[in-house]
Image (cartoon, coloured by chain):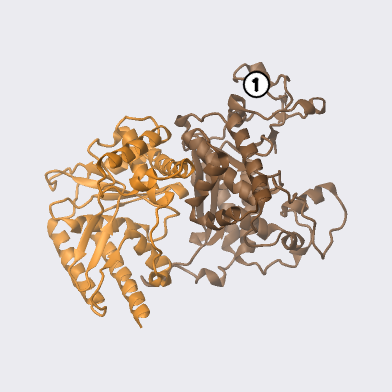
Chain colours: A brown, B orange
């Protein structure tokens, strides 16, 4: 699977420059032509700068791969993978009952909601479940920073500017019922902690302003777009909300790019999140998105994943495994105690062949608890 | 999946068999009789209000019908439909190319009109006028997302210019004690020709409804409910010929052709919903 990482040296020529089609070609990445894979260059690491302006958009638009065509057979296969994998599993008791409602007063069963967070929890092995906990994350400066950057990015895309970041961000949170508690928590922060949040939000907001160009309205940029797909006769619902979708809805060819904004550090699960988004979009649209990406507002990095059939099939398999566990959490609990290829953190360790996995105890959280460790 | 072109063609396609006037009258009389006996055990008081969300709530979460409603407070998601419709209308009339271009000026115009007149008929405008820039941006962002979904769902050049965007809700009050008020809200009302010997003067209309989430297995009755309320509202207005439902979150759409059978099913659903509401009120009053 190709990941075009946007970390790039300055002044290195690349595929786009040779083709002569991209604006800002002098800042194009060095690309291995036969694979489209970005080649890291240690010699130039010190002069690395985040992409900005047209170059940032070009990185999203030109992935080095042809855009996927509308592919009903593939969508049917993806659905088959999911539907057949769920069909042999009886609905859990909480889903109501078997079969359709028998009368008008018979309530419809609630579907099992599958979100990226629930998938992570379902697929994490027990050790990581213990380490990361479950339920909503406690409020922290990093969480506050993430929420504020989310609304500021939305503001930038919609109205083209940000005033005082902290003032605008808090005003935005004030009209969102879901963020009322977080807003109160921020209001209650002591001076130094609040200053710390403010400083980081201002720094990241300045990065957004400097690097993100105005998006062409013709691309129909939309923020916080909800995406839902029902499976297994409505017993399961895949659900996501993406920070930014650009491009008119697909017809014959993929035309949508999906961008997630993360205010914290890179985490391995971010790629799985992107793939989950790509899967839902593929299932609900005539064509999948042509690219999914994570923009890291802390550093300005942009991780770009061109969407391929393999990516979608992998996402469908992972989603199936997670959904089965969500429907029947008790099944397979024993085998989940060891390292799991579906556990995003274990998968790194497995790749590194670090030896036997501790069966008990907790695993140190590799994510820094300091500010910037938000979502 | 339906293409945008096919969906639009189906929406505006002429109809040949409109619902006869006698059938509409009979349906109204029957429904009034059934609802009257249902609400009879309730003490006189506020009306039983049935809307499309209540129809869905009664089916999916009937226990929540007894919940006390929280006091209303404006939020961006409550503005997105009204503002989003104004944005789509401005685009459809050719004033703007896209929702993102339209949303700022359309909002400013609406707020400006309220500030000039101070009319109480304005609803979200006074709230938006008092918002700080960050909060106002969230209102606009919600509206852009909503409008972009509707804007990209139809070929607007094929939609008749006389189409109505939003407007007042359709409403029919069953004269029972307490009264039962049916309210229907569609996003778009599109003129449709009637062809053939049974055609009536003035043609008829097709309705478009936009909903969140995914369609349930009772989507057909829910869409037909909008046609039912529009039919009962006034005998001088045509019975809608079809209702197109859009579920942008799910990227899907459904359409139902309206005939006496679909209207009867929708009426059955209204009766079932009213029964659920009555049950919940009786439980609360025990």
In the rendered image, which quarter contains the N terminus of chain B? top left
B26 lies left or right of B241: left
Is residue A71 visible in the rendered image? The answer is: no
Q: Is residue B241 something that shows in the picture?
A: yes
| Residue A227 drawn at (x, y percent) | 51, 48
Q: Which residue sits furthest right?
A: A355
**Along the horizontal axis of the image, is B242 left or right of B203?**
right
The structure residue drawn at horizontal position 65% and vertical position 50%, both measured from the top left corner, is A191
Query: In this figure, which residue is indicated by the disc labeled 1?
Result: A16
Compared with residue B39, is residue A313 higher up or lower down, i.e. above or below?
above
Image position, residue A141 (x, y; %): 66, 50
Q: Quadrant of residue A200?
A: top right
Instruction: Please state which of residues A36 and B68 is positioned toward the viewer in this rendering.
Output: B68
Write down the quadrant of residue A243 in the picture.
top right
Does residue B170 appear left or right of residue A227 in this picture? left
Q: Is residue A286 left or right of residue A315?
A: left
């Amino acid at each position: 699977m190709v990941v075009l990482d946007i970390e790039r040296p300055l002044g290195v020529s690349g595929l786009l420059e040779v083709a002569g089609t991209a604006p800002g070609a002098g800042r194009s990445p060095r690309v291995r032509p036969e694979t489209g894979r970005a080649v890291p260059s240690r010699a130039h690491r010190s002069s690395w700068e985040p992409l900005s302006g047209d170059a940032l958009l070009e990185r999203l638009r030109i992935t080095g791969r042809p855009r996927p065509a509308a592919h009903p057979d593939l969508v049917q296969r993806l659905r088959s993978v999911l539907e057949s994998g769920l069909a042999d599993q009886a609905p859990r008791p909480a889903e109501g009952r078997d079969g359709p409602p028998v009368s008008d007063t018979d309530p419809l069963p609630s579907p099992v909601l599958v979100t990226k967070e629930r998938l992570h929890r379902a697929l994490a092995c027990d050790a990581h479940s213990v380490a990361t906990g479950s339920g909503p994350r406690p409020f922290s400066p990093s969480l506050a920073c993430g929420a504020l950057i989310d609304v500021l990015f939305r503001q930038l895309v919609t109205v083209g500017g940000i005033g005082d970041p902290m003032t605008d961000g808090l005003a935005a949170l004030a009209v969102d019922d879901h963020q009322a508690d977080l807003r109160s928590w921020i209001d209650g922060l002591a001076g130094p902690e609040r200053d710390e949040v403010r400083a980081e939000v201002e720094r990241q907001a300045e990065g957004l302003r400097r690097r993100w160009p105005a998006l062409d309205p013709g691309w129909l940029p939309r923020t916080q777009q909800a995406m839902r797909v029902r499976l297994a006769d409505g017993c399961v619902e895949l659900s996501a909300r993406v920070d930014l979708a650009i491009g008119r809805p697909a017809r014959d060819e993929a035309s949508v790019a999906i961008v997630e904004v993360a205010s914290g550090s890179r985490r391995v699960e971010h790629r799985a999140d992107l793939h989950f988004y790509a899967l839902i979009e593929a299932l609900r649209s005539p064509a999948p998105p042509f690219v999914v990406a994570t923009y890291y507002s802390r550093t300005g990095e942009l991780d770009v994943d061109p969407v391929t059939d393999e990516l979608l099939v992998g996402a469908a398999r992972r989603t199936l495994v997670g959904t089965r566990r969500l429907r029947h959490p008790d099944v397979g609990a024993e085998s989940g105690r060891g390292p799991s290829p579906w556990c995003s953190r274990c998968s790194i360790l497995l790749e590194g062949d670090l030896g036997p996995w501790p069966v008990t105890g907790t695993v140190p959280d590799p994510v820094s608890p300091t500010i910037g460790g938000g979502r | 999946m339906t293409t945008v072109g096919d969906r639009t063609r189906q929406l505006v396609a002429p109809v040949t068999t409109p619902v006869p006037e006698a059938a509409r009258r009979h349906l109204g009389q029957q429904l009034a009789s059934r609802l009257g006996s249902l609400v009879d055990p309730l003490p006189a008081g506020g009306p039983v209000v049935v809307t499309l969300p209540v129809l869905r709530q009664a089916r999916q979460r009937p226990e929540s019908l007894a919940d006390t409603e929280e006091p209303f407070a404006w939020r961006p998601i409550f503005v997105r439909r009204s503002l989003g419709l104004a944005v789509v209308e401005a685009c459809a009339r050719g004033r703007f190319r896209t929702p993102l271009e339209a949303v700022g000026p359309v909002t400013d115009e609406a707020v400006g009109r309220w500030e000039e007149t101070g009319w109480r008929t304005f609803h979200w405008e006074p709230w938006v006028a008092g918002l700080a820039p960050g909060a106002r941006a969230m209102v606009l962002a919600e509206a852009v997302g909503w409008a972009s979904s509707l804007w990209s769902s139809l070929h607007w050049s094929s939609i008749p210019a006389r189409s109505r965007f939003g407007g007042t809700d359709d409403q029919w009050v069953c004269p029972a004690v307490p009264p039962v008020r049916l309210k229907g809200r569609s996003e778009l009302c599109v003129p449709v020709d009637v062809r053939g010997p049974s055609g009536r003067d003035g043609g008829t209309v097709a309705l478009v409804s936009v909903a969140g989430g995914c369609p349930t297995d009772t989507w057909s009755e829910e869409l037909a409910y909008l046609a039912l309320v529009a039919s009962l509202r006034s005998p001088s207005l045509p019975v809608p010929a079809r209702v197109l439902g859009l579920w942008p979150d799910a990227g899907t759409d459904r359409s139902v052709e309206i005939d006496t059978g679909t209207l009867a099913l929708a009426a059955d659903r209204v009766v079932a919903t009213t029964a659920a509401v009555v049950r919940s009120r009786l439980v609360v009053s025990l």
